[in-house]
Amino acid sequence: ARLGQMKRGPVISVATFILTPPVRGAAPTIRIPAGTVTAAFRLELESSDYRKYAAEVRDLGDGRRVFTPGSVKNSAAGLVLEIRVPAARLKPGTYAISVDGITESGEREIIGDYSFRVVR
């Protein structure tokens, strides 16, 4: 490499991860490749009782909110939510995506927390 030039790894636009319904036990470990711009999470639901959902991503180490997606997309089948998070916000650590269902009257009902651990 010439002086002043840096060798960079490939840029990965979106890395997708599937998380199953919340269960007790160890959080799955995911590896976000270097150069990833967006981490897309597909959250499997046990039922599709709501038309709208809300979510937030929290760092379980310090409890702070890392990201709140502007929208949570429900799949056509209704049993999968897709949430996109800027990969730069997910440093190595343990996180939870908290999901609420929104009723017709606008009230929030807790669905559950989808936990995961990020390694690089």
Image (cartoon, rainbow, N blue to C red):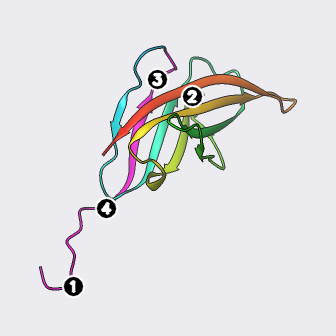
The answer, for residue 74, to whether it is visible in the render is yes
Q: Which amino acid does label 1 sit on?
A: Gly
Nearer the observer: mark 3 or 2; the answer is 3
* Callout 2 amino acid: Ala
Asked if the residues shown at circle 4 and circle 2 are in contact, with their CB atoms under 8 angstroms apart, the answer is no
Q: Is mark 3 on a helix, strand or loop?
A: loop
Residue type, mark 3 in image? Thr
In x, y percent, where is residue 88?
A: 44, 55
- Per the image, label 2 sits on a secondary structure element best described as loop
State the residue position of label 4. Answer: 11
Q: Which of marks 3 and 1 is nearer the N terminus?
A: 1
Q: Distance between the residues labelled 4 and 2?
A: 31 Å
| Residues tagged 1 and 2 counted as in contact (Cβ below 8 A) | no
- In the rendered view, would you say 26 is above or below 88? above
Of all residues shown, which one is farthest toward the top?
24
Check disc 4 and give the amino acid type.
Answer: Val
Instruction: Please tell me in which quadrant of the rendered image residue 2 appears.
Output: bottom left
